[in-house]
Amino acid sequence: MALAGKYDSKLIEEKWYAYWMENNYFHSEVDEREAYTIVIPPPNVTGVLHMGHMLNNTIQDVLIRRARLKGYNACWVPGTDHASIATEAKVVAKLKEEGIDKNNLTREQFLEHAWEWTHKHGGIILEQLKKLGASCDWERTAFTMDDNLSASVIKVFVDLYNKGLIYRGYRMVNWDPEAKTTLSDEEVIYEEKQGNLYYLKYKIEGTEDILTIATTRPETIMGDTAICINPNDERFAHLKGKKAIVPIANRVIPIIEDEYVDMEFGTGCLKVTPAHDTNDKVLGDKHGLEVIDIFNEDATLNTFGLHYQGKDRFVVRKEIVKELESIGALDKIETHLNKIGTSERTKAVIEPRLSDQWFLKMKDLAQPALDAVLDKEVNLVPEKFVSTYRYWMENVRDWNISRQLWWGHQIPAYFYGDGKEDFVVAESREEALVFAKEKTGNDKLIDTDLTQDPDALDTWFSSWLWPMSVFNGILEPDNKEINYYYPTNDLVTAPEILFFWVARMIIAGYEYRKEKPFTNVYLTGIVRDKQRRKMSKSLGNSPNPLDLIDKYGADGIRVGMLLSSPAGNDLMFDEDLCDQGSKFVNKIFNASRLILGWEVSDTIGQPEASIAAIAWYRSKFQKALLELENNYDKYRISDALMTSYKLIWDDFCGWLLEAVKPAYQSPIDAKTYQEVISILEDNLKIVHPFVPFISEEIWHQIKDRTKEEALIIASWPKIESINEDLISEFEIAADVISGIRTIRKEKNIAFKETIELSVLNSGNGTTTFDAIINKLGNLSGLNYVQETVEGAISFRVKSNEYFIPVSGVINVEEEIKKLTEELSYTEGFLKSVQKKLQNERFVNNAPDQVITNERKKEADAEAKIVTLKSSLENLSK
């Protein structure tokens, strides 16, 4: 059956994805086989496919498709994350465009808009993954706000609260003034930025003295409640017990003493603003200072900001500096490199803020998850991330799990009074009423007396349960699916969410199932451009993945993404890699087209060249199969691809097919044809995880197959014995053929002209592949001789010398002249290299690699001179 003249990726991809879906190959149910499970890192419901998704999901699909071929019950669970901050921001922006202010809506009204937006946009990225060939079990698609997943989150919150691990506290938190919510420490990105250090002059009450203090935030002086000096600093001993006056605000504040003050920084004293700096809050608590919060939730100044009320903090910074200068309270300004915390989601500069929030105690919960990685129960690939993981887990802080958002899982705490402790925590409002009556002893409480905490839980508080909740393992901890599919096998994700998500999933796994959630964590690198910049929309350096698929085909993109993406190392993406991937797909297509186009004869015998070539390739294939197993075991997915790539491109297409193909317009013998088809099928099996579409297409072109015989559910090739001698002997034969081809090219001897080859064998040669040398060299004869052949050009392979008579084929006089000139040039080149190596100064000062290179040049030149002299001697006889 002949293939079409040209490979049409779009047509083939649509055809086979529809076929796979129609026959439900991606779906998994509990059965007697061993399970192989992957849960997708759920992309944000707001998201569209980007290059990072392409890499991550290609790797997952490679692993899941191979697992199917290996006979496992492969289950890849897809889904999306509700992404509280990102989604709420998009819904608020959409409402704003429609002239609707979120603040004018009730929570229920806002959530209606949020769900409408989610239903409209939420499935986009999953549909795009299908274009890539992702073989997810789409029937299992989950969403972190699904009823059972939401119920799991609430159940876990209540359980952890009842265990005393969740508490409510008034703490300094990271405040995102754009999203108007608190963030956990892990959601704050610190960046070094050039800023200013402002030296402000504070008057000392009742004196003419001035105290100069350096600050990076002059706009916060309205919240100053003390000035702190180091008790050991003799420069300020005269100020002990005195008071200072805050510029502009004209408030009188105490001067306190504490060794916390760094005498070397700035002027050696510190303005203390407990409401707007974490360290200042600690100082304030220690010394009983007043706390004055000058900011609104959007980081504009409130009434404590006096005439700056309603203005943004950065606008105030510029204006207050001018005012301070005008009243003589600004001494000087210096440039200063400062670490600025920004929101991981909105990029807004974080504002430290005191607030009532919910926290999860992490120290004791983290220990089993730390031990799991250190004891190799959970393997991080590559291992370099273990030390990073260990540092974070050993220094873990309590997790701020509440967010001032409406989109998400509302915290199941119900307030029934005016006090901060007047609340109960329950899985339902009805249950909360029962608890509130018990706690207060008041049976007259009714439903309307309860007010549920308006905050939502951090998005990660739902996704940390993902490997369990997608199998309903929280609500039904002994159901057959959680017992069968959990723990999952491999997790493929990005290093930047190692703590946001991976560590927390491990913590949750040990807390709720007393075991790991997965065995291996494959941490991909970041996709960067050729200039090493991270690909992003803002930089405009990230191609649209769907455009790439249209141009190069999904198989080509998959190969292109994996060609240079070793685990944990960044991928320098280059579109040329996709072109290379596309060429590989076409290579497979054209090779298969060649084979399927051969005429087959049952009446001719199998040539020696074919017998030898097939025996060699089977051993070569088995060696590659072992390499593949090793690469997959070590999660060297890029290396596994390269092993398959080289085997098919070089060994199968470059050597085997050339060795077995019949003469022009002649048939091939049936035995060779069947063996080549068998080999092609094995090749398709090992390459299917990387290029599923082209491989499935050719698989069905070879012969008609039933749905039970599809490649996607075929059996992985079995490991058999390897004949290493055949492999090494073929390498010699290949070098001989290359030597013949080089001489033909250099001497302009057409391939259709037969030539004679003589071999001066040193005694350790082999004749195993002489038939292939004969065929691929187009020899009229291959003779073994005892001495050098006169009138011939020679070349060496290992210890054997090969001679090709040239009389009648080339002009001997011209060839002698040419070889003489080449010999003269090479001898001159050798002298120049040796002169360098005899120069002690050069040898002593040059880098080792340079010396090594020069010695290699010397050896190569010497070997070439020997060959040239031998050829000249033979031609001259």
Image: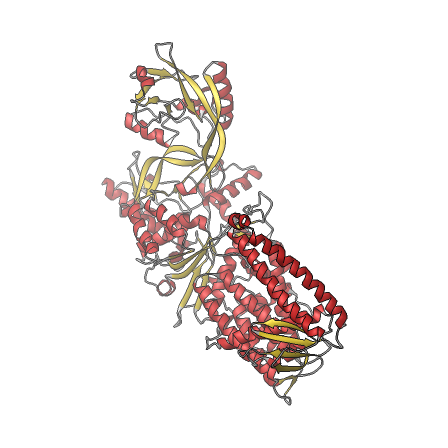
> Please, is residue 491 above or below residue 341 in the view?
below
Q: Quadrant of the N terminus?
A: bottom right
Residue 228 versus residue 247: which sits nearer the camera? 228
Answer yes or no: is residue 138 visible.
no
Tell me residue 38's x, y (percent).
44, 61
Residue 177 percent location from the top left of the image:
46, 34
* Residue at figure coordinates x 59%, y 56% from the top left: 834
Q: Specify the quadrant of the image occupied by residue 584.
A: bottom right
| Colouring method of the image | secondary structure
Q: Is residue 480 visible?
A: yes
Q: Is residue 221 left or right of residue 290?
A: right
Instruction: Name the residue rendered at 32%, 62% in the picture.
Output: 478
Instruction: Quadrant for the C terminus, please.
Output: bottom right
Tell me the residue at 56%/81% (across/down): 768
Q: Nearer the viewer, residue 291 or 675?
A: 675
Residue 341 locus on image (x, y percent): 45, 36
Give the x, y percent position of residue 656.
60, 75
Quarter where residue 509 is shown: bottom left
Q: Residue furthest bottom?
A: 603
